[in-house]
Image (cartoon, helix red, strand yellow):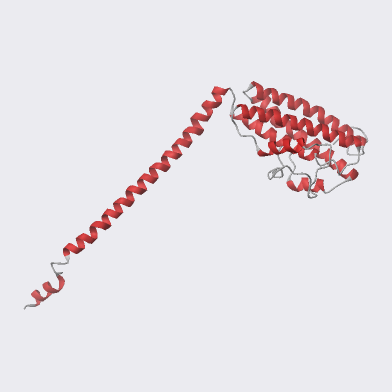
Amino acid sequence: MTPQDSTTEETTPPSGDAPDQEAAATPSAYGLGRRLRIMGAVLAGGLAVVLALLLWLGVLVPAKQEAAGYSAADSAYAATAIEHNAQAVQLSALAPGRSTDDAVLALAVEVGEASAGRVSELAGWLEDREIAVPAAGREALALAADGLDTELPDNGSGPRAGASAHSHEGGNHGMLTDEQVDALAALDGSEFDIALLSALVEHHYGGLQPADEEIAEGKDADAKALAQAEADAIRIEVEEVREVLAAIGGPGSNDGSGS
């Protein structure tokens, strides 16, 4: 046997091995193709969901709003105003058990009930349009239903109507932070009275911005009317709060101008 013959014999695989290799390669190729087809189906399904969501957000929701006669600004105002008034209810509910001043207690009830009334009206506007009502609104109504003129049991940080009633971010439209509410709830007597009324003045003034924006830019006549009523009520309530605040020796007690 020549060296050339030897090389040929060593490098050429037995003829019986070739079919096995082909058989092994065939299932692998089939499996890869099957996986690719599955991945393609998954991606196509995901793309369909995304496209459907974009269609809903970009076409169907605006179309629904247009048909119902309201805009995104209208619904945003209603949700923001509910959150804002819900905190006013929460602040008012702190007074029983912390204040002993009859004027402060009476004013807290007045402000709390008025704010709860606005929450109810705004929630009705949202529900009529099948828009979800913020949880804080439902919790504020439950808190008001328990009675704003009686001391409610709490853990020392004020009455809470539910899990999200204490989740305000604060710093926006006069909203108090959780820490500010806790600090207020830790006070009593005249310190609490002055701190509560001062907070309500700032809080109420903050609520004028979304109301005034809705009056100027809103589309829905009912939403604009609710915003106008709120703005008018806020201006009256702020003056009432400032008068009581001055009477108990708070900021502005010397000249009656408030802070």
The number of numbered badges drawn on the structure is 0
Q: Position of residue 97 (x, y in %)?
A: 86, 44
The answer to which of 24 and 47 lies nearer the viewer is: 24
Q: Please determine whether, in this image, residue 86 is positioned above or below residue 179.
A: above
Q: Position of residue 47 (x, y in %)?
A: 42, 41
Q: Name which residue lies at 44% across and 39% down.
A: 49
9 lies left or right of 33: left
Q: From this viewpoint, which residue is outermost toward the left?
A: 1
Q: Quadrant of residue 202?
A: top right
Q: Quadrant of residue 96?
A: top right
The answer to which of 159 and 219 lies nearer the viewer is: 159
199 lies left or right of 56: right
Q: Name which residue lies at 76% across and 35% down.
A: 145
Q: Please determine whether, in this image, residue 60 is positioned above or below residue 3.
A: above
Q: Position of residue 17 (x, y in %)?
A: 17, 67
Residue 212 visible in this rendered orientation of the protein: yes
* Quadrant where the N terminus is found in the figure: bottom left
The answer to which of 242 and 18 lies nearer the viewer is: 18
Q: From this viewpoint, which residue is outermost toward the top?
A: 221
Q: Name which residue lies at 67% across and 34% down.
A: 80
Q: Position of residue 79 (x, y in %)?
A: 65, 34
188 lies left or right of 39: right
Q: Quadrant of residue 131?
A: top right
* Quadrant where the C terminus is found in the figure: top right
Residue 257 visible in this rendered orientation of the protein: no
